[in-house]
Amino acid sequence: MKIFSGNSNKPLAEKIASFLSLPLIRASFKTFPDKEIFVEIFDDLKGEDIFLIQSTSFPVNDNFMELVITLNTIKQCSPRSITAVIPYYGYARQDRHTTPQSSIASELTARLLQVTGVNRIITVDLHTPQIKKYFTLPVDNLSMTTLFCEDILASYPLENLLIVSPDAGGHERAQVLAHHLNVKAITLHKARDEITGTCNMQFKTSVIDQNCIIIDDIVDTGETLCKAAEFLMQKGAKSVNAYCTHRILSGTSLEKIALSPLQEVVFTDSIFSSISRKGCTKLRQLSIAPLLAKTIRSYA
Ligand code: R5P
């Protein structure tokens, strides 16, 4: 078994390799002046099981091209098997036509990945689990429920605890987490203005005096999370915290979180973030390295 790190999330790959007591494969990545990507591998991969760690996060297109070029380069080295470990799977939000002539990039990225010769995908909290249907190879979609559940139990009292999905897409995720914690879950109705991107929330049942925990897969602009937190506080909630798997955190999301009524937002390290917290002291990180290392070991 050998571990290979792409460039999108080296700290996570190093942690995984350290849990498995394995060195990272030696390779060089170069970009031509026009940004074309060139990969060269220095280790012998013949007959080995190779696990390439690469999130397709910002800059999504560069990281995706690096992923497929590296997978294809690995294939040419005659390994026994290749697994792409994609902790954050970009383009998962384009899972269906939103208008009759719009793109479904999830389907295309699945096909592009498969022509590289990869044998299996391991990923985390896919935005829509149904996109697995675009692959003809096994896709192991790891859920954050257990990790979040353990952390909630260690960090918050269960009394008056309410799990909240900020939109219909996250309904099942919230229900499963609430079931594990033996507490209630609600799903807000979110309407997003297509032009401005701003969100409006609605929900009729009372949240008065509830300690709300919002659960979501992605925080991108922070609009969904912060509007949901404001809405819950306006409706009488006692406190609002959040657990979100993938921190895209683009634009002014950090400022929005800092100004919001959210007390704490817990993310994972599925996406590497070098962004300074700009005065936002509300963020905490849980590492998915132990879970990914355990999963990788189970396939070796
Ligand atoms: C939506 O379906 C997702 O689960 C997230 O709620 C959404 O992608 C978050 O985006 P933003 O932070 O831009 O509101």
Image: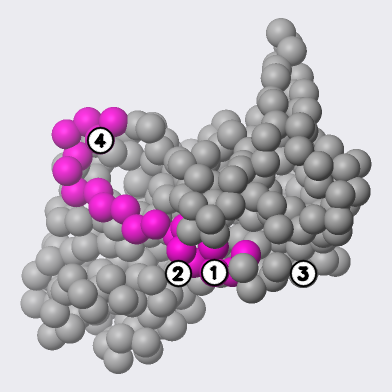
Residue pointed to by mark 1: 294
Q: CA distance from mark 1 to mark 3?
A: 17 Å
Does the rendering let one see residue 89?
Answer: no
Q: Is residue 253 visible to the viewer in this orientation of the structure? A: yes
Part of the protein shown in magenta: 276-296
Q: Quadrant of residue 80?
A: bottom right
Instruction: Select label 1 or label 3 by which is in front.
Output: 1
Of residues 40 and 170, the one nearer the viewer is 40
Q: Residue at x 30, y 86 (%)?
A: 181
> Of marks 4 and 3, which one's residue comes earlier in the chain?
3
Q: Residues within 10 Å of mark 2 (few under 14, many from 20)?
A: some
Which residue is denoted by mark 2 in the rendering? Answer: 144
Magenta highlight on residue 289: yes
Q: Residues within 10 Å of mark 3 (few under 14, many from 20)?
A: few
Q: Is residue 209 left or right of residue 277?
A: left
Position in image of residue 122 (x %, y %): 65, 62
Q: Which residue is mark 4?
A: 277
* Residue at mark 2 to residue at mark 4: CA–CA distance: 24 Å
Query: Residue at label 3?
Result: 138
